[in-house]
Image (cartoon, rainbow, N blue to C red):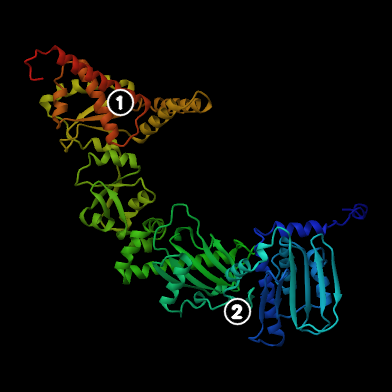
Amino acid sequence: MNADSRDDLQSFQVNLTGVVDLLSKHIYSSPRVYLRELLQNGRDALAARAELDGADASRGIRITPLSEHNDTFQFQDDGVGLTADEMTELLSTVGRSSKRDIFDLPRSDYLGQFGIGLLSCFMVADQIVIQSRSARGSAPVEWIGNSDGTFSVRELEGDLPIGTTVSLKPRFDQHDLLSTPTVLSLARTFAEFLPVGVRVDLPGGGSETVTHEAPFLEAHTASASDLLRYGSELLGVEPFAAIPLSVPGTNTTGVAYVLPSSPPPGARQANRVYLGRMLLSENVDALVPDWAFFVRVVLNSTALTPTASRESLVDDDILEHTRTAIGTVLRQWVLEMAARHPAQLNDFVQIHALALKSLVIYDEELAKFITPWLSVETTLGRMTIESLTRDHTQLRYAETVDEFRQIASIASPDRPVINGGYIYDTEIARMLPTIVDGLTVDRVSVLDELDFLEVPPLEVRSVVAKLEDRASAVLADADCAVIVRGVPAADVTGLYLADPEVLRSIDRRSAREISRPGLWKNVLGKMDAFAEDRLASDGTSKSLARLCLNWNNPVVVTLSTLRDDAVFSRTIELLYVQALLTSQRPLSVRDRAMMTNSMSDLIAMSVALGDSLPESSPL
């Protein structure tokens, strides 16, 4: 950059009215934070005075809300106070300053915090009046600031006690936020654990002190009953357990409460965080690892970094260190419970199985303790992994629920199959050989399982082959081939079997049938065509579903001898629909039409047969 171009440079013109509007109305999520910011200022002022001339338990904060007899809200603290120069600097900090950038938040010094936090009051009032006397020795001063960015500072005659009083007259639409019920509620929410006394004047006289001790601050020394009592107040129900937390590296202490019931899928983590014992938020969702959604945490810290609005945490290295440390504590708690309190662990697993499954697939040490207690669905019923692996050295798993449902009908009891279609269950099945010595686990498909079904005897092979051909011709339009095998359960007439690629094709076709002509229907058609072209390029014929008729069932044996083509066709169609329903597959438009037409034709044929019989016939 040359000298001539440097001469053309101009300074930004800061519109103070716009800055005030931006910070006071847009950086904060709700006008209710005005009281939190005043409380923060008051607490900081009291801390600064204690550093200057020593602590004094009589000092504190007094709030006078609006009432029938009082049209001005007042917030008074016995803190360090402000001088006239600091009053002026207050506005320049907000507007422009060679020493500070207005967006360099959060401030670490008291004056900066006071200036930025004070702006939140413009959400409830158009004018802020501050009267203050500094503990460092100076005349009392008054600062009057307006929401249009103008202000005035003057010295006051007479004497004022050391400290600061902020006076607000509510805007026409914010009277309720400065009234006694709301102020009391907000003061209890934000300030109940502050290390300084906070009292709120009541309309009928007297006051209520809202501050008290916080049991979670000394969780390692507090009694279990006290922690559980506070957890019940926090959650609205008694927690399953209370786990003390301590992260010395970030000066963080608190409690993790184990929920007594599993939270809904996708539920946000609503953890409560205090900074310097002032409430930051009741809904911090990045404080614990994602897998630990079985806990709700309440903690206090002096090192975690708040955002500019002080309503959430900055996701920085400090937060990451704290999150990792909390995860380590929770993991250790589970390990100790597995080693020392197996009955409690069993109850815990029943409640939070999903969270534990997500945990063990990433933690080999924890998996050795926890996995045996987990349960999975199998072809033998729902079982714990401990009982399943105790009785079997060879296991198999199906990757989808649809595959499992089909396999469950034909699987041998000696070769159980795990339903891996639920979240994490496939991963857990695959890792079992690393936990249980001598165990093998293999994936199984529907077509693999067909190989283990009994083939009909040699002497009836020709009859069976003819039955397969006739039945396959009936179901050709349904893209279903028919095979005959011996299924152990004699009461089963037929099973619907299809590999995942076939099921996906069927789902696409069903969606296309109910779609209106247009882009989506064309897209589904092109997807089907692409899938078939891919099969052709691999040298594979069109992939078909299969109806497996059970040769051990008398109905199927009778069908093999039936000569009436009409009755045969309608019966095969009904067996096909029955197999679909048994496998919990939804019926397509074509399937429903097939069922209706088949039943109608069989009824019509039965009526015709009845009419043709002589009257003496028992039919």
Q: Is residue 374 left or right of residue 104?
A: left
Label 1 or label 2, whichever lies nearer to me, is 2
List x then y, in percent, for residue 495: 24, 33
Mark 2 burial class by Cα count in 10 Å: few <14, some 14-19, many 20+: some
List x then y, in percent, for residue 560: 16, 22
* Residue that label 2 marks: 195
Asked where in the image residue 151 lies, by quadrant, the reply is: bottom right
* Front in this rendered view, residue 85 or 212: 212
As measured in the structure, the alpha-carbon distance from the residue carrying label 1 to the one carrying label 2 is: 75 Å
* Front in this rendered view, residue 122 or 523: 122
Q: Amino acid at mark 2?
A: Pro
**Residue at figure coordinates x 23%, y 48% from the top left:** 380
Res 30 seen here: yes
For marks 1 and 2 on the same chain, the one whose residue lies earlier in the sequence? 2
**Residue at figure coordinates x 64%, y 64% from the top left:** 310
- What element does badge 2 sit on? loop
* Residue that label 1 marks: 480
Q: Is residue 588 left or right of residue 463?
A: right
List x then y, in percent, for residue 322: 53, 67
Q: Amino acid at mark 1?
A: Cys
List x then y, in percent, for residue 247: 52, 72
Q: How many marks?
A: 2
Q: Are marks 1 and 2 in contact (CB under 8 Å)?
A: no
* Front in this rendered view, residue 129 or 405: 129
